[in-house]
Each structure stands twice: as C-alpha cells, then as structure tokens.
Image (cartoon, helix red, strand yellow):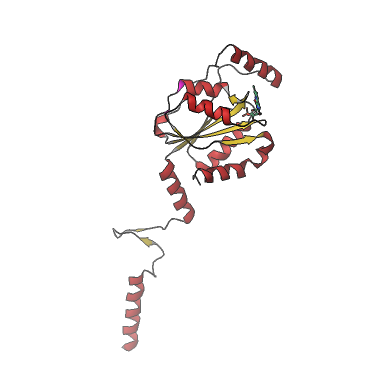
Amino acid sequence: MKKILFVILLLVAVELTGCGNQKGKISNGKSSEIPSTKAVKKMTSNNNFGRSLVVYYSLTSHTKQVAESIHHRVGGDIVAIQTEKSYPTTYSATTAEVKKEIRQNQLPQLKTADIDWHQYKTIFVGSPVWYGNLSLPMQQLFRQHQFQSGIHIAPFFTSGSSSPKEAFTTMKRLQAQPSYHQPLGITNDEQSDRNRLVDQWLKGIKFD
Ligand SMILES: Cc1cc2nc3c(=O)[nH]c(=O)nc-3n(C[C@H](O)[C@H](O)[C@H](O)COP(=O)(O)O)c2cc1C
C-alpha cells in the first residue's frame, strides 16, 4: 500500500514540475513547441526590422553577389533594377557611354520593376560606385521612387577601390525622408571575403 501511495505521489510531482512534458506550456494551457534559440533570434530580428527587401543594380555581378549574400541572411525579397537600354559589353565602351550620360545630365530609363514598396520596413539598397558616385541607374531609382519616412535603408556599395562615401551622400541628398544605416562598402579585392564582411556589417547595424 505504502509503495502504491509513493508511486502516485511521484507521478503527481512529475506532472506539477512539468518534467514529464517535452513541450513548453503557455499561459492559456495549450502546449507549444519551444522554439530553438536560432528561431527566436530570427523572429526577434524580423520584429525589429520588419519584412525586408534587397534591391540592387549590378552591371558585372559584383553588387549582385553581395546582394545575394545579404538576402541569404536576412530573407524577404530580392529585386534587380534593370535599364531599358543595355550598356555595352566592354568596360571601355561602358565607361564612354556613362561619361556621355553624365556630361549630358541624362539618367538611363529603367525597366518597370513590380515592387510593392509598402510591405517593407527595411530596404537594403545596393549599387556599384561609378566615378566616385552612385551608379546612374540607382540615381534614377532614387529620383523616380519616393521612399516613405519610417523606412530604414541599409545601403551597400561595391567599387574597384573607391570609398562609398560620395555615393552614400548622393543617396541621402536624393531621398532625405528615410532613416539610413551605416553603409557597407566592398572593393573588388574584398569580394572573396564578402560573406564575412556582410555578417560583420549586419551585426554592426544590429541585424543579426
Ligand atoms: C562606368 C563605371 C565607372 C566606375 N567608376 C569607378 C570609380 O570611380 N571607382 C571605383 O573604385 N570603381 C569604379 N568602377 C568599378 C566598379 O565600381 C566596380 O567594378 C563594381 O564592383 C562593379 O559592380 P557591378 O559588377 O555590380 O556592376 C566603375 C565601373 C564602371 C562600369
């Protein structure tokens, strides 16, 4: 009899302490899976930053590769901005064409991109540096599209070796309403290290 009483008491104790349950309990009495630390971290990040979009322009894929690295880490959507008219295929012909556009104060027409901007709270914007400045297609996007205040822009740039400083200044001059995170700049020499640099940057802007 004593033995049976002991077993009953033991079972009650186990149930009360929750040790007999592999699932977590929430206050309404329903049980739910305890999310892994990683899942909690991701959910927290999304709560802080909202749904994100990675939008970029890239002529020779350097910025595209950085954009994909960011997208892989932050999720959300990714869109490439494209010009109506293609730039020439050689570097010298392209630079000649871009110089002409700059001289004539002309920005390239963009293909219409089907973006529902309103669903994003954080927008990662990527561009190559052209003549020390923001690439012309990205300047066009910033002239055509009005970013709302309350939007967070996280800019990233690739370049041969130039600093992204002037390109970033141009971005802020063209669109003053959104708030801006510190930009990421990756030179061609640093491309092979881009995943680490992206991680470091995301950590710096608290998106990790
Ligand atoms: C028209 C043009 C102008 C450029 N001007 C610069 C420059 O001023 N400074 C620099 O470091 N790199 C310059 N570059 C190199 C690009 O910024 C660099 O290769 C960049 O990573 C290319 O990105 P993408 O492959 O995404 O187009 C220029 C390239 C082009 C095509």
Closer-to-camera residue (18/50): 50
Residue occupying the far bottom of the picture = 2
Instruction: Classify residue 160 by image quadrant.
Output: top right
Question: Is 206 on the left-hand or right-hand side of 15?
Answer: right
* Residue 42 drawn at (x, y percent): 46, 48
Q: Residue at horizontal 62%, vertical 17%?
A: 98
Question: Is 197 on the left-hand or right-hand side of 19?
Answer: right
Q: Is residue 79 above or below residue 28?
A: above
Q: Residue at horizontal 56%, vertical 27%?
A: 167
Q: Is residue 42 visible?
A: yes
Image quadrant occupied by the N terminus: bottom left
Closer-to-camera residue (39/189): 189
Closer-to-camera residue (41/114): 41
Q: Residue at horizontal 66%, vertical 37%?
A: 191
Question: Is 205 on the left-hand or right-hand side of 186?
Answer: left
Closer-to-camera residue (71/18): 71
* Residue 91 drawn at (x, y percent): 69, 22
* Residue 112 drawn at (x, y percent): 49, 21
Q: Residue at horizontal 49%, vertical 28%?
A: 172
Q: Provide the residue span drawn in magenta.
A: 144-149
* Residue 177 drawn at (x, y percent): 42, 29
Principal secondary structure, stretch drawn in magenta: loop
